[in-house]
Every structure is written in C-alpha cells, then in structure tokens.
Image (tube, rainbow, N blue to C red):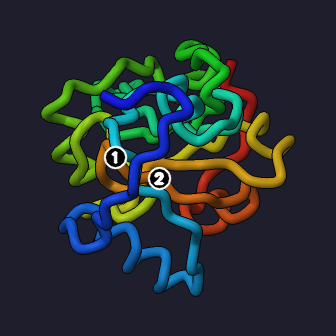
Amino acid sequence: MTEPGELVPERDLSTHPSVAVVLNTLAAHHISPTVRYLPDAVRTARAAADALGVTPAEIANSLVFAGQGHDGSVEPVLVLASGGHRVDEDRVAGLLDLAALDKATPEQVRQWTGFAIGGVAPIGHPAPLRTVVDVTLGGFDHVWAAAGHSHSVFETTYDELLRITGGKAIEVD
C-alpha cells in the first residue's frame, strides 16, 4: 500500500476487459476522458477521493440496488450518488414508484452490471439499467467515476453522466 502523497507510477489497465468495456462505451458517446489508474484499490468514495486529491463529494459512487416493484417484481437500479451522501432508500424508492429499494447482493451487482463491487462503472453494462444521478454532483465542474476496475477511475461531468446513462436527476439523501 502506498503512503498518502507518495508518487507511484500508474500502471495502464486500459486493456483489462472491464476497463476496455468502459472506454469503448465512452468512445461510442464521443468521450475521451481523463482516466487514472491508481496503485491501490479504491473501493470507497473516501479512498478514491484521497487518491485523487479531491473531496468525497466529487466522487460519483455507483451503488446498485434491487428495486422491488409493487407487484413483487425485482429490477436493478443504479444510483450515482455523491460520495459525500448516504442514499435515502425509502425516498428514492418513492420517487421511482417502487415498493422498496434494497442493496443488491454482490452476485446481483456482477450479473446486472458486469462489474465487481469496487469497480462498478456508470456505463458499459450488459443491458441498460434504470439510473438515478444525485443532483449534488451538479455542483462540481468535474466528478470522478469508477472505470470498471477497483484501480481505475475516469473524469466526467454531471451533465455528461446524465446523458450517457439516461439517468434521472434526483436528490438522493
């Protein structure tokens, strides 16, 4: 593990299958982002913020939930929350007309997104996910999101996240 402030050369993960999916999806949206490959895994918004020298609020944390329909059905819901926020699951469920919103299991996360927890990107999933984007992210010129691997992140904007995910802007906390 590196010490805070210690400079370690970035290793290029652009050919890692999960990262390549994200980069290809971004390219399909005509986006060539700044991508950072970090020496240590950044599985939390705090860890990502510390590694990047930004605040946790500037991290678009990809959180996957199992949305419970009023008819008992289950659908994946991706919440891109500002890393400084805790998602109010009851509030978000109500705004999405769902009976409940439960944290997805690691198996559901992998099945629905194609990514392991800690590297879940907002895009590049096997099928489109119902997506919510925290309005708080709109207060920053740039935010950072996972790029398919726990050691990779990409720089984006709130408006870009809304566009590329087809997400709904809501207050999540």
In front: 111, or 67? Answer: 111
Residue 26 location (% of width, % of height): 49, 75
Specify the amino acid type for callout 2: Val
Residue 135 location (% of width, % of height): 77, 38
Specify the amino acid type for callout 1: His
82 relative to 26 in the view: left or right: right
Residue 37 location (% of width, % of height): 40, 55
SS type, badge 2: strand
Q: Quadrant of residue 97?
A: top right
Q: Residue at x 36, y 25 (%)?
A: 68
Instruction: Report whether residue 129 is seen.
Output: no
108 relative to 42 in the view: left or right: left
Q: Residue at x 52, y 36 (%)?
A: 51
SS type, badge 1: loop
141 relative to 130 in the view: left or right: right
Residue bearing mark 1: 151
| Res 132 label | none
Q: Quadrant of residue 72?
A: top left
Q: How packed is label 1: few (under 14 Cα within 10 Å), some, or many (20 or more)?
A: many
| Res 153 label | 2
